[in-house]
């Protein structure tokens, strides 16, 4: 396969153009076409000569993702997309409208190998780590389809971003570049299940993105029972890495905590959680668990969620409860993809 120009940073693209004997400024033109005008072919680049377009066509590709299914919520316009990648891999993305702007939740891998017991994306393991293009074009194709600007991105679809580290970093760099979409780093949230050594690497990158850490438990015993990654990445070490990250970046971490009835949602669990994270530069996002057909975890009552929230708040921990969007197109977190794939087999 030919090199996909869209996955290159502007610097790399400039080198590439120089290598084939073209002027450096051509790179900026092409970059704009790919990342601002969302062109999917060289033929659309009308300010390039026909001969240059032909030369590019002969040597390079511009990859994209192809929409194969879309579900629009009548309640709040939340829209779930299934996109197909090359070689028929399927990924899921979600468009969400908030008062402060439109956000897209993108996938970083087709499937996932982290094995969280409550998650649908990991059931069949990981099939592929996405290229920068495959992450970027989820956003581009959604903007085109919706005819609206997307101002925020969360890396919370299928996949573990820190298990696809180099591509994810390049994705952020391209998305944030002023010659490209120019999305502010503060509008990009990277969510991880807590791969400690990669969190230290990320802290050194000097980024202003928001880091979300999927905690989902107040101690190792519970965490080990629902998140296999926890065994090699225990909580005290994870908390140390989080403190290092906030010290280094001065950015607040979000702890995600999916409440599962009888597993991690008791008042004692809330108190233990508060004691573990007290004093940290953080915020807790409580998520009523999305019930997945293949999994046995269920949501607690709204009272139990409220009680959990109040215990954290009363101990000085900033806490929010995630609002559920698009409940009429339910198929929560990766289930749409799973169903689509199962039906194809
Ligand atoms: N691998 C990354 C990002 C993808 S998952 C991570 O683990 O953070 C995004 C978030 O959705 C994570 O917090 C994950 O734990 C959570 N999640 C997965 N399945 C869920 C479910 N059934 N209900 C609620 N949250 C879920």
Image: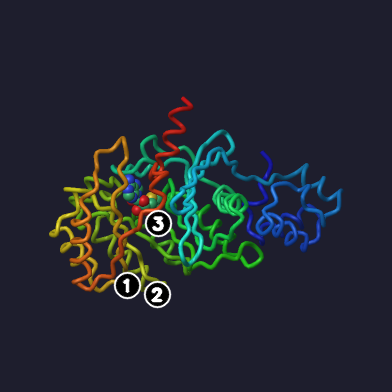
Label 2: which secondary element = loop
**Residue contact at pointers 1 and 2, CB within 8 angstroms:** yes
User: Extreme front residue here?
Assistant: 74
Q: Residue at x 32, y 58 (%)?
A: 256
- Distance of label 1 from label 3 (alpha carbons): 16 Å
Can residue 165 be seen here? The reply is: no
Picture quarter with the N terminus: top right
Task: Point out the tag, 1 or 3, that comes first from the N-terminus.
Answer: 3
Residue 143 visible in the snapshot: yes
Label ID, residue 326: none
Q: Residues within 10 Å of mark 3 (few under 14, many from 20)?
A: many
Does any atom of ligand 1 lie closer than 8 Å to the CB of label 3? yes
User: Image quadrant of residue 268?
Assistant: bottom left
Q: How far across and down, in percent of the image, does residue 190 sit?
A: 43, 58
Q: Position of residue 211 (x, y in %)?
A: 40, 63
Q: Residues within 10 Å of mark 1 (few under 14, many from 20)?
A: some
Q: Is residue 107 left or right of residue 282?
A: right
Residue under label 2: 250
**Element at badge 1?**
loop
Which label number is shown at residue 281?
A: 1
Q: Is residue 309 above or below residue 116?
A: below
Disc assigned to residue 191: 3
Q: CB of mark 1 within 8 Å of CB of mark 3? A: no
Q: Secondary structure at mark 3?
A: strand
Query: Is 144 rendered above or below residue 242?
Result: above
Farthest top residue in view: 345
Q: Which image quadrant is residue 14 in? A: bottom right
Percent x, y of residue 102: 51, 60
Which badge, 2 or 3, is on the more N-terminal residue?
Answer: 3
Horizontal arrangement in the rendering, residue 9 relative to residue 188 (left or right): right
């Amino acid at each position: 396969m030919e090199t996909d120009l869209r996955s290159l940073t502007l610097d790399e693209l400039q080198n590439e153009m120089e290598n084939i004997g073209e002027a450096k400024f051509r790179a900026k033109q092409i970059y704009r076409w790919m990342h601002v005008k969302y062109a999917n072919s060289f033929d659309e680049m009308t300010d390039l000569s026909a001969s240059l377009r032909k030369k590019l066509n002969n040597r390079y590709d511009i990859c994209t993702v192809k929409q194969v299914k879309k579900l629009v919520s009548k309640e709040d316009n939340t829209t779930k997309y299934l996109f197909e990648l090359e070689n028929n891999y399927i990924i899921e993305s979600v468009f969400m409208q908030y008062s402060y702007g439109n956000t897209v939740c993108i996938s970083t891998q087709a499937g996932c190998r982290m094995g969280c017991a409550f998650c649908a994306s990991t059931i069949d393991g990981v099939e592929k780590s996405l290229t920068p293009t495959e992450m970027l074009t989820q956003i581009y194709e959604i903007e085109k389809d919706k005819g609206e600007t997307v101002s925020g991105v969360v890396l919370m679809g299928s996949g573990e971003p820190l298990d696809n580290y180099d591509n994810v970093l390049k994705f952020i760099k391209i998305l944030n570049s002023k010659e490209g979409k120019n999305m502010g780093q503060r509008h990009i949230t990277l969510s991880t299940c807590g791969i400690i050594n990669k969190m230290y690497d990320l802290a050194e990158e000097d980024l202003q993105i928001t880091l979300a850490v999927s905690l989902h438990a107040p101690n190792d015993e519970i965490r080990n029972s629902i998140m296999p990654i926890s065994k090699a990445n225990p909580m005290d070490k994870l908390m140390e890495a989080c403190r290092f990250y906030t010290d280094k970046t001065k950015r607040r971490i979000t702890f995600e905590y999916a409440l599962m009835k009888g597993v991690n949602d008791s008042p004692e669990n809330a108190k233990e959680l508060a004691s573990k994270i007290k004093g940290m530069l953080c915020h807790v996002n409580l998520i009523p668990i999305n019930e997945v057909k293949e999994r046995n975890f269920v949501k607690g009552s709204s009272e139990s969620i409220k009680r959990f929230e109040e215990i954290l708040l009363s101990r000085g921990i900033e806490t929010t409860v995630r609002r559920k969007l698009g409940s009429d197109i339910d198929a929560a977190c990766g289930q749409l993809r799973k169903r689509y794939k199962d039906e194809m087999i």
